[in-house]
Amino acid sequence: MTEHKVAIIMGSQSDWPTMEHAANMLDDLDVAYEARIISAHRTPERMYDFAKTAKEEGFSVIIAGAGGAAHLPGMTAALTPLPVFGVPIQSKALSGQDSLLSIVQMPAGIPVGTLAIGKAGAINAALLATAVLAITDDELADRLNDWRAANTARVAQYPSNES
Ligand code: RP5
């Protein structure tokens, strides 16, 4: 099994209830991760230091959640060769449309793989990060396949009146 670790970074403590869903998914898939608060605006030096050393720290993929004028994923991607997946946080003012457009509209040359706004995006970022790592890890690929099969099995064929 290859050694790999996912970084989950977010702009604020207030992003954690969303980004926790990424952490929970990685827990379910037995993928190692570290979660950190790194703000592109309020802690730019922390962002720079993290992004410049993330690869040598042993991270393989970065999941970055941010809301509003959400610069964290793009700025991090500009400073590291690692793949960065961005999660737009559902902001109060614009329901995350601001976060989504800030993250998704990267100029050509610095890619950020952008997921859906909020919880679904956080979960899918974890699944996508796992799929990347599973390319070189057969055991992890098996766990991801098992999770996907269980996800399929959870879908009933007919609707029920029970909630
Ligand atoms: C962004 O500002 C964070 O990612 C967060 O989504 C948003 C609001 O932050 P707080 O004011 O809640 O700390 O940088």
Image (cartoon, rainbow, N blue to C red):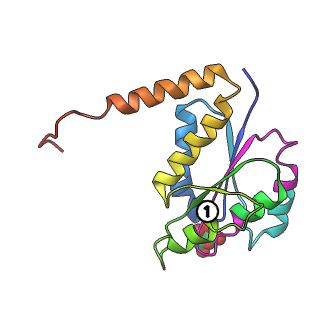
**Residue 139 locus on image (x, y percent):** 62, 19
User: Is residue 68 left or right of 40 when viewed as pictured?
Assistant: left
Is residue 115 placed above or below 162 in the rendered structure?
below
Q: Is residue 47 visible?
A: yes
Type of residue at label 1? Gln
Q: At 58% from the left edge and 42% from the top edge, which residue is drawn? A: 128
Q: At 47% from the left edge and 24% from the top edge, which residue is drawn? A: 146
Magenta-span inclusion, residue 8: no
Is residue 76 placed above or below 30 in the rendered structure?
below
| Between 102 and 32, the one nearer to me in the picture | 102
Residue range highlighted in magenta: 50-72
Query: In which quadrant of the rendered image does the N terminus lie?
Result: top right
Q: At 87% from the left edge and 54% from the top edge, which residue is drawn? A: 52
Is residue 30 placed above or below 92 in the rendered structure?
above
**Residue 35 locus on image (x, y percent):** 67, 49
Point out the quarter of the image occupied by ligand 1: bottom right
Q: At 68% from the left edge and 24% from the top edge, which residue is drawn? A: 137
Give the quadrant of residue 162.
top left
Q: Which residue is mark 1?
A: 13
Is residue 100 placed above or below 55 in the rendered structure?
below
Q: Is residue 21 visible?
A: no
Does the Cβ of the disc 1 residue fall within 8 Å of ligand 1?
yes
